[in-house]
Structures are given as C-alpha cells and as structure tokens.
Image (spheres, rainbow, N blue to C red):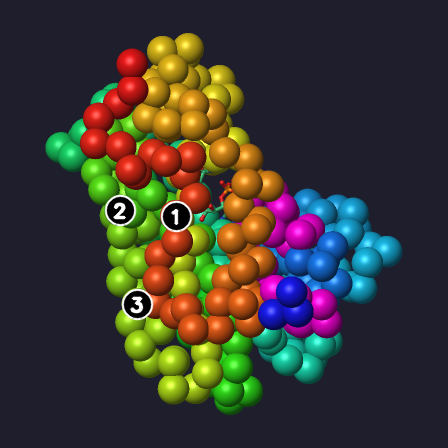
Amino acid sequence: MDTLRIDGRVVLVTGAAAGIGHEIARACAAEGAVVHLADVADTVHEAAAGMTGLRAAVAHVCDVTDPEAVRRLVDDVIAASGRLDVAYLNAGVNGVPSPLQPGGAIDDLPFADWRRVLDVNLDGLFHCLQRCAGVMKAQRSGSIVVTASTAGLRAEPRVSYPYVVSKAAVLGLVRQAALELARFGVRVNALAPGPVVTGIGGPGPRPAAAVAAWEDSVPMRRWGTPADLTGLALLLASDASGWMTGGTYVADGGATALTQVLS
Ligand code: NAD
C-alpha cells in the first residue's frame, strides 16, 4: 500500500543512539528514508554507521535540554537534506526511584531529581517541537511523533513522580501543538508504549518479584521490545495516517485495558 511508504522522506529521531529511538531510526532507514539520528551520547555515531548501505543515516550529537544545540541540530538537518518530513521526538530519561522505593515518596523526592527528568522529557521536547514545528509550518507539511508513555495515562506505583508527570504533560503539549499546526498541514501524535526492554525499562537487574509484578500487569505477559513499536511508528509517519492528529496511540500488550493485575 503506497500510502504506508516513507522512502525518500527526511526523518529526524532524537534519543536515537539506543532503545526505542534506535529501532525506529533503523526501521525508517530500512524503508528507504534519509535518517538523521540525534543523541546526547556520542555512540550515536556507531548507531548511524550501522545503518549505512541504505539511503543515508547521519549522526548528530545533541543534548535536547540545550535550546541552542537543538537549533543547530535542526539547522544542520535542513542544510544537509533541504527539508524535514518526519520528527520522532523520543529522547527521554527516568532513573528516579518510584514512590515505593527509598527517596521516591513525594515527601522524600529531591527537587534535583524532579527537575532532571522534566528537563529532558518535557523542556527538551519543547525545544525540539518548537524548532521542528517552525520548519514544517513553513513547508506546510510534516508529521511529528512524540514518544509518550502509558505512565502518562494513569497512576503507576512502580514509576517515579517526575516521569509520570512529564509523560502526562507531554500529551497536553501534543494536543495543543496538533490544534495549532493542523491548518499548516502538520500532524502531531503521541506514541505511548507500555513497558519495553531498553536502558530505561525491562527486567534488567530488578528483583524477581518486581519483574513478576510488571509481567502481571501486562495481559500478553511479556515486556515489549523496541521492534514491537516500529509498525505504529511508521504508520504515524506515513500518509496512511493522514487524517490522524492530536491522538495518543498505545502499544502495551494490553496493560492499560486492565483494571486489576493478573494472577
Ligand atoms: P533508552 O535509555 O534506551 O534510550 C533513550 C535515549 O535517549 C538514549 O540513547 C539517551 O542517550 C537519549 N537521551 C537521554 N537524554 C538525552 C538528552 N538530554 N538529549 C538527547 N538524547 C538524550 O530508553 P528508551 O526506553 O528507548 O526511551 C526512549 C523513549 O521511550 C523515552 O522518551 C522514554 O520515556 C519512552 N518510553 C520508554 C518505555 C520503556 O519501558 N522503555 C516505555 C514508555 C516510554
């Protein structure tokens, strides 16, 4: 189906050195897109190098919390490729204890932890959205896909305050930007994953009881993988979703359909 194709489109992915962003970048490159990978980690160069042989994959080291660096990033994409068709605004962090862990309860949480997560997940997104929206408005076309989280849709006992709050706020930003940008032919949607095996998520070094608790919250009884998200990510980038904007699209193995944990 031609409307699902993104070959030749110019795509920017933030947080592309690892995890979900890396897999989305790889999927776009495999579909023949020109992909710009941005990350604060300089391993983004290796990530992009692994994608050569396809149309083009360009690495950019960029900290999304720095508005000037984000301005340079988007300028560099335009200088290299002439336009920007798709922006996956995906960079994110957590690393703060949940309310059930020491240092994570509301009366214990250090303000620095709160700020660090909001700086990346919300302010960093704002900087990227501003610059990408500016370019796409002038072009009168584009698709922006923000990686939100099911943690932004409901309270999550095993996820930190600033992460849950940042991801809830992201959904408001997506809706408001979709409202403004619709008349310029620019769409803005949120992709909301459940628990996915990456640097942020996954069983990792967690105690067995915590791993089991996560799996009891997912009807499909497994963590997602970054590859579980690429179909939805490509759909939201492509013309097949041409009448979809301001939405939040969940991929979570059924977790948000549940009202109580499985046993
Ligand atoms: P990850 O840690 O594997 O990847 C995140 C990437 O973002 C890393 O490469 C990191 O270097 C980069 N990054 C962090 N701070 C940055 C900054 N200031 N500037 C630029 N890049 C920065 O984790 P992931 O799970 O792939 O996370 C990607 C997105 O998915 C995040 O927004 C995260 O909140 C979201 N998400 C993850 C899960 C999950 O369970 N893994 C679930 C829902 C949503």
Ligand 1 lies under 8 Å from the Cβ of mark 2: no
Q: Residues within 10 Å of mark 3 (few under 14, many from 20)?
A: some
Question: Residue under circle 2?
Answer: 153
Residue 208 belongs to the span the image colors magenta: no
Q: What amino acid type should be assigned to the residue bearing mark 3?
A: Arg
Camera-nearest label, 1 or 2: 1
Marks 1 and 2, the one that precedes in the sequence: 2
**What whole-number distance in Å separates the C-alpha atoms at marks 2 and 3?**
14 Å
- Mark 2 neighbour class, 10 Å CA radius: few under 14, some 14 to 19, many 20 or more: some
In this view, 225 is above or below 204:
below
Q: Position of residue 59 (x, y in %)?
A: 70, 58
Circle 1 is placed at which residue position? 250
Q: Are marks 2 and 3 in contact (CB under 8 Å)?
A: no
Magenta residues?
4-27
Quadrant assignment, res 146: bottom left
Q: Earlier in the sequence, mark 3 or mark 1?
A: 3
* Residue 62 drawn above or below residue 134: above
Q: Which mark, by number, is residue 36? A: none
Whether the residues at callouts 1 and 2 have beta carbons within 8 Å, the answer is yes
Left or right, residue 62 beside residue 184: right
Disc 1 element: strand
Q: CA distance from mark 1 to mark 2?
A: 10 Å
Q: Which residue is mark 3?
A: 175
What x and y, as percent, mark residue 121? 39, 52
Q: Residue furthest front?
A: 1
Q: Position of residue 180 (x, y in %)?
A: 33, 80
